[in-house]
Amino acid sequence: MALALSLPEQIARLRADLRMGVGVVLHRGETAALVLSAETLTAARLADARALGPAALAVTARRAETLKARAYDGDLARIKLPADANITWVHSIADPSGDLIHPMQGPHHSLRDGSADIHRAAIALCKQAFLLPAALVVPLADGAGLAVSHGLNRLDLDMAGANLSASSPLHEIAAARLPMAASEAGRLHIFRPDDGGEEHYAIEIGRPDRAIPVLSRLHSACFTGDLLGSLKCDCGPQLHAALNQIGAEGHGVLLYLNQEGRGIGLANKMRAYSLQDQGFDTVEANHRLGFEDDERDFKLGAEILKKMGFAAVRLMTNNPNKVAMMQAAGLTVTERVPLKAGRNAHNADYLDTKAAKSGHLL
């Protein structure tokens, strides 16, 4: 029936619930568990969840490395909650902001028996919700019954399949002429995903010929750099340099993708900045939070360009990984166009780290 929720819509609801601190029920076959975000968990809900059975905190292998916890499942660790663990303990495991001020008390006991599928899905949902990648997981004998009695949303992981990690299809919903300082021949296109997630934008300058490679830039949103003129990164100068370069050439497309902080969200980006103030570089900060170096999905950019009628691009980037990802997504990259702007005394170490650890050609 068309009125029923699709799987992407169900997953979107679960992400919203986790952001509000509401629990969700995940199940695979006969195995079910209550899942709550560690970041938004309250003391009252922690107490209620623990009353249901033995709880574990699922964290990524990156975070587990900092905690000196064994990641028996490879990409994650299932840390057993000690009998005296309270909400402060849970938050301290998930959030590294106090690691140096209040050293972790261990050793942590990691679970190694049984499946980690639900724990892995829980972490994926937290990441998609731009929360810290850590989740409280409590096994349930009757997941369906708990969901019904408490009004919780529930997801069958076998049915969800690839929908849990797949990008939602994007559709253009509006476009209009937009004269800009870089070019009076500007046009802004708005793309919205089916699951109601973040919208993404395409700034088209001139009338690019769809039959030849288009000069294009994939720019990830940076509130601090693009709007506030932050000197900690080179994002703002790169945005304006790219627009000016496309404007000077007379035609091209700049994609503005709402993937703040390399895909971890603005709140987590600020947590990473706080860790950088403690002496960690940008990659180390992301790892301590539990994230990879870069959590962005560049397939979104490829999808937008293809929907706009382009098959080949001259890509403005210093990041070879972008070239590889765009080609893997079905776009031909005929040329990598360097874009070097914005180096200053405040971001020199940041740029050097991107070059040394992330392969940027600076």
Image: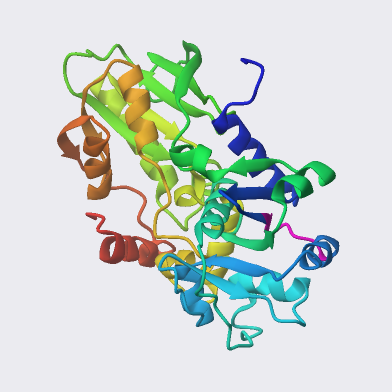
Callout count: 0
Q: Residue at x 78, y 64 (%)?
A: 52
Q: Which residue is situated farthest in the left direction here?
A: 334
Residue 7 in picture, x, y percent from top left: 56, 32
**49 to the left or right of 62:** right
**324 to the left or right of 145:** left
Q: Residue at x 83, y 67 (%)?
A: 47
In which image quadrant can residue 37 be found?
A: bottom right
Residue 330 in picture, x, y percent from top left: 23, 30
In which image quadrant can residue 132 be found?
A: bottom right
Magenta span covers which residues? Answer: 34-43
**Observer-nearest of 281 and 104:** 104
**Residue 289 is one of the magenta-drawn residues:** no
**4 to the left or right of 45:** left
Residue 173 in picture, x, y percent from top left: 52, 15
Q: Residue at x 62, y 34 (%)?
A: 10
**Observer-nearest of 329 and 349:** 329
Residue 45 in picture, x, y percent from top left: 81, 60
**Residue 41 is one of the magenta-drawn residues:** yes
Q: Please say if 227 is above or below 64.
A: above
**Observer-nearest of 321 and 30:** 30
Residue 319 visible in image: no
* Quarter of the rendering occupied by the C terminus: bottom left
* Quarter of the rendering occupied by the N terminus: top right
Q: Please say if 122 is above or below 187.
A: below
Q: Please say if 306 is above or below 46.
A: above
Residue 203 visible in image: yes
